[in-house]
């Protein structure tokens, strides 16, 4: 599908992107800034966030903000403190892209380690639940807000050996659907994106023998990411959309 948006469609919008240091998160932050948004760059590696910050400023886009946070160890208080800071600085939040995620280990079900399972669920599900809870009051202050979750093909259909990651993505889609239904009469729209096979570090980790040159780059799947954050997608709610439909 051809997702068309105005060049400055995100002007005056503040959008938080998790996992903004590299891969899809970095590209989403750049694309949102390019379309006029002030981006809040959240991630655990400050040097990577600073590099994205520098790239956005050098391009002449609105100056972003950096929020260093490790989702693995973050507490409920961390998220509520962050929400207070965002409200104090910006007054509202217009968009939240849950992009950060952990793959865990590809292995047979009976060999999944409890510690690995807990870590994947913490990063991919619990952190998103707590962060969204904390940020909802700030999102409600916007006249047209968006929450975007990141799913996967293994979040639609379970696949052998994908264990914790697959389960976490089923949970992610469930969380998105619940929120979308609850917020259907509000000014907040909630959807999910399945990016599909994309040239990222996580993809290389999952498919080490794959020829990455055959995959789309993060930049190539961005039209959907921008569209679902933009006013143009006002009627879309509760959907998980494939960025690379077959």
Image (cartoon, rainbow, N blue to C red):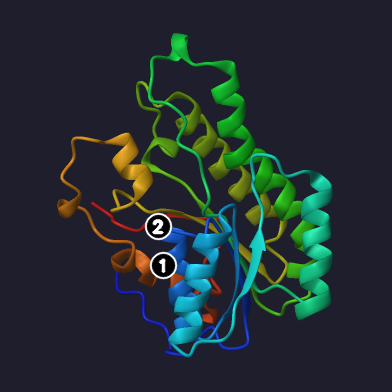
Q: Answer yes or no: is residue 52 visible.
A: yes
Q: Are marks 1 and 2 in contact (CB under 8 Å)?
A: yes
Query: Label 1 neighbourhood size at 10 Å, few (<14), some (14-19), many (20+)?
Result: many
Name the secondary structure under disc 2: helix
Q: Please give the label number shown on residue 23.
A: 2
Find residue 212 and report its horizontal and vertical position in percent.
20, 49
Find residue 4 and report its horizontal and vertical position in percent.
36, 81
Query: Label 1 vs label 2: CA separation?
Result: 6 Å
Image quadrant occupied by the N terminus:
bottom left
The residue positioned 39% from the left and 33% from the top of the image is: 157
Q: Is residue 118 left or right of residue 31?
A: right
Query: Label 2 neighbourhood size at 10 Å, few (<14), some (14-19), many (20+)?
Result: many
Name the residue nearer the viewer: 37 or 69.
69
Name the residue nearer the viewer: 172 or 11.
11
Q: Answer yes or no: is residue 35 visible.
A: no
Looking at the rendered structure, the number of numbered marks drawn on it comes to 2
The image quarter in which residue 188 lies: bottom right
Q: Point out the residue furthest to the top here.
A: 110
The image quarter in which residue 58 lies: bottom left
What residue would you read off at disc 1?
27
The image quarter in which residue 187 lies: bottom right
Q: Is residue 139 left or right of residue 56?
A: right
Q: Is residue 25 left or right of residue 147?
A: left
The residue positioned 50% from the left and 87% from the top of the image is: 61
Name the residue nearer the viewer: 67 or 84.
67
Q: Is residue 40 left or right of residue 99?
A: right
Find residue 217 and report its horizontal and vertical position in percent.
27, 61
The residue positioned 37% from the left and 54% from the top of the image is: 195
């Amino acid at each position: 599908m051809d997702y068309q948006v105005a060049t400055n469609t995100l002007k005056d919008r503040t959008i938080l992107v998790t996992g903004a240091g590299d891969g899809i998160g970095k590209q989403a932050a750049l694309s949102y800034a390019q379309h006029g948004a002030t981006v809040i760059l959240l991630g655990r590696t400050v040097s990577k966030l600073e590099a994205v910050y520098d790239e956005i400023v050098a391009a002449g886009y609105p100056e972003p903000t950096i929020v260093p946070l490790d989702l693995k160890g973050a507490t409920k208080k961390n998220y509520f403190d962050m929400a207070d800071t965002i409200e104090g600085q910006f007054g509202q939040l217009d968009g939240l892209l849950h992009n950060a995620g952990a793959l865990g280990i590809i292995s047979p079900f009976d060999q999944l380690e409890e510690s690995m399972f807990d870590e994947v669920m913490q990063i991919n599900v619990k952190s998103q639940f707590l962060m969204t809870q904390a940020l909802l009051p700030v999102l409600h202050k916007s006249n047209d807000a968006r929450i975007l979750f990141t799913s996967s093909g293994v979040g639609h259909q379970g696949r052998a050996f994908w264990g914790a990651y697959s389960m976490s993505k089923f949970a992610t889609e469930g969380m998105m659907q619940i929120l979308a239904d609850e917020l259907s009469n509000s000014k907040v729209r909630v959807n999910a994106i399945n990016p599909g096979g994309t040239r990222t570090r996580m993809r290389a980790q999952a498919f080490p023998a794959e020829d990455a040159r055959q995959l789309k780059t993060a930049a190539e799947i961005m039209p959907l990411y921008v569209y679902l954050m933009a006013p143009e997608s006002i009627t879309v709610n509760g959907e998980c959309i494939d960025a690379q439909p077959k």
